[in-house]
Amino acid sequence: MIEAPRHIIDVEQLREPELQAHLLERAAEFQAMAPADYPKPLQHRQVATLFYEPSTRTRLSFDTAAKRLGAGVPSTENAGEFSSAAKGETIEDTIMTIQGYVDAIVLRHKDDDSSERAAAVAGVPIINAGSGKAEHPTQALLDLFTIKQEMGQVEGLKIGMAGDLAHGRTVHSLVKLLRDFDGVQIIGVAPDCLAMPEEYRQPEDVYVDRLDEVIGEVDVLYMTRTQLERIDDEAVVAEFSKQADNFKLTNRRANRMKPTARILHPLPRVGEITKKVDKNPRARYFQQAHNGLFVRMALLEWVLEDAA
Ligand code: ASP
């Protein structure tokens, strides 16, 4: 019997307890291994990275993860500009073509439904590496991995999320994953013009419009940048800029956090965390980015496990 490809379209799939536990354990195993000891389960496999939006960490960590597991990685630089999308080709046609060359496709695209559309026509797994403002499931898994590792457990944590909660796909995916842990409270920090959409909220959440109100309370502070490329209303940008200082993490503010608290950011940062915070013992955003490699190794291994 031919099994359906193991797509990773949204974070819902990663909420399945057995799969989630397997991926997190496997990521920890990869983290503990010396690179020379990595197994090569993807030898003779090809993993395409097809990115229509800019990326540093997601792209390079997927490339490296695939190569470390033995795969080849054909990719196109800036697919929006240099692939046939520039000539007007649809995502569906591009996917139907590339699937004939490779065993899995890692896709980033500005449309919220891009991964669903790709998966609907793909005979090989589609891995969503960021779709519009809707989803970034592999980032959410690496965020969860980092929170577990740094805090020991997720249950009962107060998780602050600050910045552009309206358009940030990383917070939208992460919030869904965190709901599965008892006693987690989300504390959103955003101006009204960039507030968390209703669909992601729960009654136990708290929403405020300045970091100072909650800085001493949170166990994890997940900072985000303003997603300027997804905002076409200049009034929103102007309003946020006026209030930006309320959401900026300076070292002075960071020092008012609990000593055990941790600061995360999916990166890139563009001013919302000052450079001085990097040396603060609570800062973990570069470690978080490094964890992405191990989590993506675990994901690729699982996605291609039974592929013929
Ligand atoms: N790198 C993350 C993303 O692709 C966060 C960001 O760009 O702000 O969504």
Image (spheres, grey):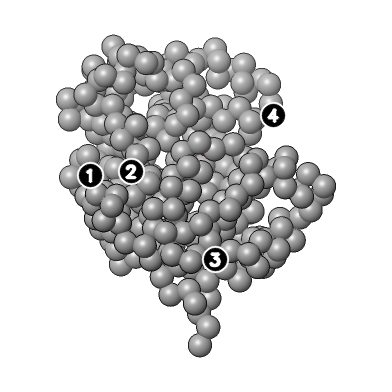
State the image quarter where residue 281 is shown: top left
Judging by the rendered image, the residue that carries numbered circle 1 is 149
Nearer to the camera, 123 or 151: 123
Q: Is residue 49 above or below residue 263?
A: below
Nearer the observer: mark 3 or 4; the answer is 3
Mark 2 or mark 3, whichever is nearer to me = 3
Residue drawn at (50%, 88%) of the image: 1
How far apart marks 3 and 4 lie (CA) works out to: 37 Å
Three-letter code for the amino acid on which mark 2 is drawn: Asn
Residue at disc 4, secondary structure: loop
Does residue 128 appear left or right of residue 88 in this picture?
A: left
Residue named by callout 2: 291
Residue kind at label 3, given as amino acid type: Asp
- Nearest to N terminus: mark 2 or mark 4: 4
- Mark nearer the viewer, 2 or 4: 2
Of pointers 1 and 3, the one earlier in the residue sequence: 3
Tell me whether the residue at label 2 lies in contact with that at label 1, contact meaning CB atoms closer than 8 angstroms.
Answer: yes
Image spot of residue 166 (x, y percent): 54, 35
Circle 1 — which element? helix
Residue 26 drawn at (x, y percent):
28, 59
78 vs 72, nearest the viewer: 72
What is the three-letter code of the residue carrying label 4?
Answer: Asp
Dot 1: within a 10 Å radius of its alpha carbon, few (fewer than 14), some, or many (20 or more) residues?
Answer: few
Nearer to me, 107 or 231: 107
